[in-house]
Image: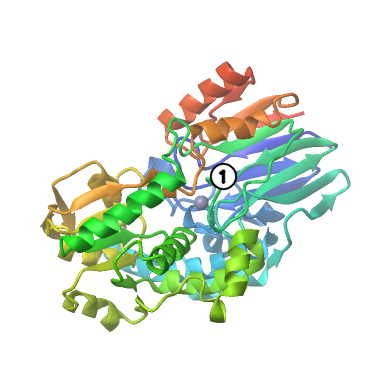
Amino acid sequence: MNDKLKFNFYGGTGTVTGANFLVEAKGLKILFDCGVLQGEMIEDRTNRSPFPYIPTEIDYLFVSHAHLDHVGLIPKLVKDGFKGKIISTPPTKDLAEAVLIDSLGVLRKEAKTEDKPALYSEEDVDDVMKVWETFPYRQEIKLKDGLTITMRDSGHIIGSAMLEISHDGKKTLYTGDLGNSPSPLLNDTEIVEGLDYLVMESVYGDRNHASHKESKEALEDVIEDTVNSGGTLMVPAFSIEKTQEILFEIKEMMVQGRIPLVRVYLDSPLAIKVTDIYLKYVDYLNPAAQKIFSRTKDGEIFSFPQLVQTLATEESIAIKDYHHPKIIIAGSGMSMGGRILHHEKNYLPDPRSTLLLTGYQSVKTLGRLLQEGVKTVKIMGETVNVNARVVSLSGYSAHKGSDDLLNFVDASEDTLKKVFVVLGEPKSSLFLVQRIRDNLAIDAVAPAYREYHVLD
Ligand SMILES: [Zn+2]
């Protein structure tokens, strides 16, 4: 039997989204993540295409975290015959279920427009959950003699994990997404030393972020300016982590009297559900956040009197009838569908209003166009003039900036044989490859789609 480990790159190459990697070792086939491509259509790699491997032959799927670009194709994998086990941390399992169910609405709409069956159904999600097992961080999961996988805290969203393979004593780490530590809610990314091989993300491989402190001050200013001019602050929110982080900080600013006490709408059924999951797994938050949680009544770490959660569609529609300055947090984070589109249609033409972008905007998404300063956009078939201010705050990023990515690699400088740079736009990945080679003198490459490497 061939006892070398083969690492296959089936997604997340040349692009941020669509994470999908296959590890072959000791006769086992183990997938790492199974996500959708978002906002990008890359010829033969669209989400509907058959998988580039045989799903029935896969033994395990390890899931790094519950973002759609890491879990979105799992129901299709199961539908296509996957019979193995799915493994993640407990929060990731709960979040993935919420995320997959929430996507059904968009999928059905898309299917109707394209006159094709939806990518998956609610029953497929049920089947996924039946074979999903959970383990805590730092527990060695033995798959075969000489082959274990350990999940380590990546500090990106609650429950997010890096996947460390130990294969006959050699250590290979797949980072998933790496958090922008320190975060107000999460523990710092675990430092991993003594790695032989590293497969790492590179969303911000070519850039550093403003500090979290600067961005928090900027958020305070943006809220004040928008409220003072009588406008609406729109925050297209990523439902997991960013929404909870922003609620946590808005609450703090209100309690400390640093911003006006305006109404804040949390207009996202998914974000409302996810916030409940955060409250269920408080022990996965950092000690400071746990302390604040233990001091608040009824676990109101993310809520305050001015917060209005609009679960029903009618409640969401009624937001426009509230004519006072307000803050609206709504999905989706890249303005690709979701309730934010209605608010953008209403308030982008208003020069008193502000659109606040707090995270990565994928190529070709509406969010990216707005970030690049486009003055007219099409929203739900209508031409909309953009007179509102558009502000990007990089310190709220959930991903490490370039210097921090390099520091992460540096922890294993003495032992690393090669670094594989993935999950980034080409410009960003290649920049990081160059920095790793030049600054750390470690071999690094950005693999292409379907490339594989034998790690021995
Ligand atoms: Zn992520």
| Of 157 and 293, the residue lying toward us | 293
Q: Is residue 119 above or below residue 314?
A: above
389 displayed left or right of 286: left
Q: What residue is shown with label 1?
A: 178
Residue 231 position within the rendered picture, expressed as x and y whole percent measured from the top left? 17, 63
Residue at 44 percent across and 52 percent down: it is 47
**Location of residue 284 in the rendering, given as x and y in whole percent from the top left corner:** 65, 62
User: Residue at left 33%, top 59%?
Assistant: 236
How many numbered discs? 1
- Disc 1: CA contacts within 10 A as few (<14), some (14-19) or many (>=20): many
Q: Nearer the viewer, residue 440 or 99?
A: 440
Q: Residue at x 26, y 51 (%)?
A: 366
Amino acid type for the residue under numbered disc 1: Leu
Residue 93 visible in rendering: no
Q: Quadrant of residue 327?
A: bottom left
Which residue appears at 30% of the width and 57% of the height?
335
Residue 248 in percent (x, y) is at 46, 64
**How is this picture coloured?**
rainbow
The percent position of residue 220, horizontal first and vertical second, equals 33, 56
